[in-house]
Amino acid sequence: MRKTARNTLAATGALIIAMGSLSFTPNLASAAGASAIEEGKKIAFHRKKGNCLACHKIAGGSLEGNIGPALVNMKARYPDKAKLRVQIFDATVSNPNTIMPPFGKHKIISKSELDKVVEFIHSL
Amino acid sequence: MAQHQKDGGATMKKLLLITAAISVLSAPLVSQASPEEDLKTFRGYFMERFPSVPLEEFANGVYAIDTASREQWEAIEEFPPYEIAIDEGEELFNMPFKNGKTYASCFRNGGIGVRSDYPYYDKDKGQVETLVSAINDCRTKNGERPLKLKKGKITALSAYMAYTTRGQTIDIKIPHDQRARDAYETGKRFYYARRGQLNMSCAHCHVDHSGSKIRADLLSPALGHLSHFPVYRSKWGGLGTIHRRFAGCNKQVRALPFKAQSSQYRNLEYFLTYMSNGIPWNGPGARK
């Protein structure tokens, strides 16, 4: 009984996602993007999640550290979003000595949280 | 400037790593890379990174480089929050055990001005002896129960003993004994090893990025880190031993801390105190 309920929920979720990706309405797409960015921001700023402000200056944040570079102009610095994802997933790929934690590799945040953080950082 | 600092950090670590690698590879051929060389590199790195800070100033931790909070800290030192602990420590120090003896019977010079003897490699015990372990050894030898290791009476006693040692210079010796060298090397490796879910080493924060801000906290240089323990921290609302601090810094990166007075922390203390040679003993201290 419970199982069925969960399956139904999962199916509904899948349907919504499928609908989202099939949607040709530009308004709807950007609305979904905006909420991913908004959620990504929350995860990035959360002290127990990304806590990116410990080291980076990011627009909208406060009490930021200065260990890493300010995160600005990200689209210009990372035209390829996948590269940005790698940097956040495991910063030791580009610099084996880096202090930056491997957020994906060490499961500091989940995959879906990481995707949202990438959306947020890429929007800066 | 930031670039220069980062390069300095990488070079520094490489140097120490190379030293370590060489000592492993060539151990059977030539003598091990010396702690003396490590010390020269380590001190040189910080003197270059903070050129306006004289060597003895590194005894003051973050306040040696943080002009913004220096004044406030100096005001605190006028009426130091650790003063009561020193008095309490003196009283405990002079209070006879049940067998009539006192702590004075266990230490050189009756225990006055001897904080500088620690840590050292104890060949009989085959491990690093720290001031805290020596205090507890004295107790058990005299039929008393050992004290808790991170705060409380142990910090009062060691605060008093640090206080009578003020003004002496840190001068830790690593003897030509393979086991002592191994203890030192193990402590060194600990310092440069990544750990915890956040994957950071002590050196990441206190060598490579010392002087930078993590959130609102300025990261203090590792040089001089052992000069002033036990320390009063406003965050703790009391005093703590150096191993309490080590555990706190391990937890920050979501690593499992080791036990106070574990061999890991003893070796770490051995390495880190040796790296502060030439700097005054100025404990107990006060920090945020």
Image (cartoon, rainbow, N blue to C red):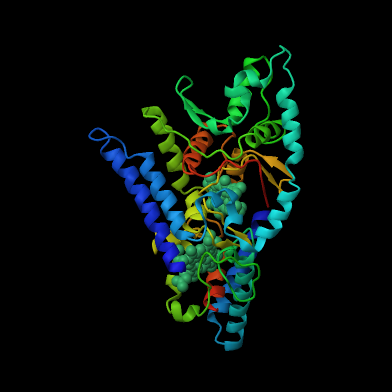
Seen in the picture, residue B14 relative to B182 is either above or below; the reply is: below
Point 54% across, 60% down: residue: B211
Residue sitting nearer the eye, A46 or A23: A46
Residue sitting nearer the eye, B122 or B43: B43
- The outermost residue toward the top is B99
Residue sitting nearer the eye, B286 or A116: B286
Seen in the picture, residue B260 relative to B111 is either above or below; the reply is: below
Point 72% across, 23% down: residue: B94
Seen in the picture, residue B205 relative to B191 is either above or below; the reply is: below
Point 41% across, 53% down: residue: B44
Point 52% across, 45% down: residue: B279
Residue B20: name its quadrant. Answer: top left
Question: x, y (%) of residue A100?
Answer: 49, 60
Horizontal arrangement in the rendering, residue B285 relative to residue B210 (left or right): right
Query: Is residue B144 visible in this depiction of the protein?
Result: yes
Residue B182: name its quadrant. Answer: top left
Residue sitting nearer the eye, A43 or B16: B16
